[in-house]
Amino acid sequence: MSVQTYEQELEAWRAMQEASWRQENGWLALAGLFWLEEGESRMGTGPDMEIQLPSGKAPAHLATITLKDGKVRLTAPAGSPVYVDGQQVTDIEMMPERPGPATIVTSGSLAFFIKNEDDDFMAVRLWDNDREERQSFPGREWYLIQDAYRVTGRFEPNPHTEEFPRTFGMVAEKETLGTVKFELLGQELALQALPGRPGTLFLIFRDKTSGQSTYAPGRYMLGELGDDNTVTLDFNKAFNPPCSVTNYATCMFPPPSNHLPVGIEAGEKYVDFLH
């Protein structure tokens, strides 16, 4: 692949990343995350609702979410504007995100589903597709493309459990697949790898730019895994977790073993949009 073709493909990839955050039911449309406890949680715009919806966007009581024995059920008053797949509903079991597919409920500009993770929690994740943030976000910023940050590493399988810090003070115990070892900026480095999309490894890392020009908790990247356990690492594609632009995402951050002692001036920079 020529340098020009590579840069064109990378710019197209970055444009898709930008669009994915602005899209309907995207990260910039998030409007709430509500933890569920056993029993009933009423949702609506009324002041006594456990799940508060944006003012003017729903009736005082839109619906009731009931968590019982690990299952979630939605019931709604007759005539309430609650829809699933375009059909008005008054009583339905809501399938959570995992194992999925999640039941997505819509009401006007609002949409919501049940977010869950390793049986640690159940929560209602809410979107409002009229949120101003979808338009007002100034855009994702990136370092200039640099070929020096495209390297080939080697994957060494070593499945084991690793603790990954998470938002809201939580910790996720994840089964890592092994270690990716590589050389960058004259140093021998290593990262613990999680499963990614087919043919890839998911890498979460911090480096010396974190908290300076890049997002303080760390960034994400996918490594392309070859049949011979070689891994193509392109730090020009390092990207921020969604927690960098919303308070309503649940993100994992790197364990100490994935804190790199170098400054990686490649990939996505940090735009302080939340403050």
Image (tube, rainbow, N blue to C red):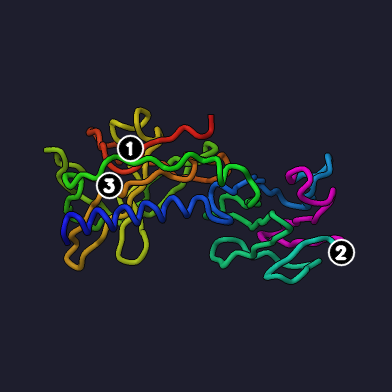
Of residues 257 and 26, the one nearer the viewer is 26
- Numbered circle sitting on residue 236: 3
Q: Position of residue 272 (x, y in %)?
A: 47, 32
Residue 176 appears anywhere in the view: no
At 19% from the left edge and 42% from the top edge, which residue is drawn? 189
**Can you identify the residue that label 1 sits on?**
206
* Residue 184, position as x, y percentages in the image: 16, 42
Q: Residue furthest right?
A: 78
Q: Position of residue 222 (x, y in %)?
A: 32, 54
Name the element at disc 2: loop
Residue 146 appears anywhere in the view: yes
Q: Which residue is mark 2?
A: 79
Q: Is residue 70 magenta?
A: yes
Q: Amino acid at mark 2?
A: Gly
**Residue drawn at x 24%, y 51% as measured from the top left:** 234
- Label located before the other in sequence (3 or 1): 1
- Depth check, mark 3 against mark 1: the one in front is 3
Q: Which residues are magenta?
A: 52-78
Helix, strand or loop for disc 3: helix
Provide residue 200's location: percent of width, then percent of height. Answer: 31, 61
Residue shown at the point (56%, 45%) measured from the top left: 135
Q: Quadrant of the N terminus?
A: bottom left
Q: Quadrant of residue 91?
A: bottom right
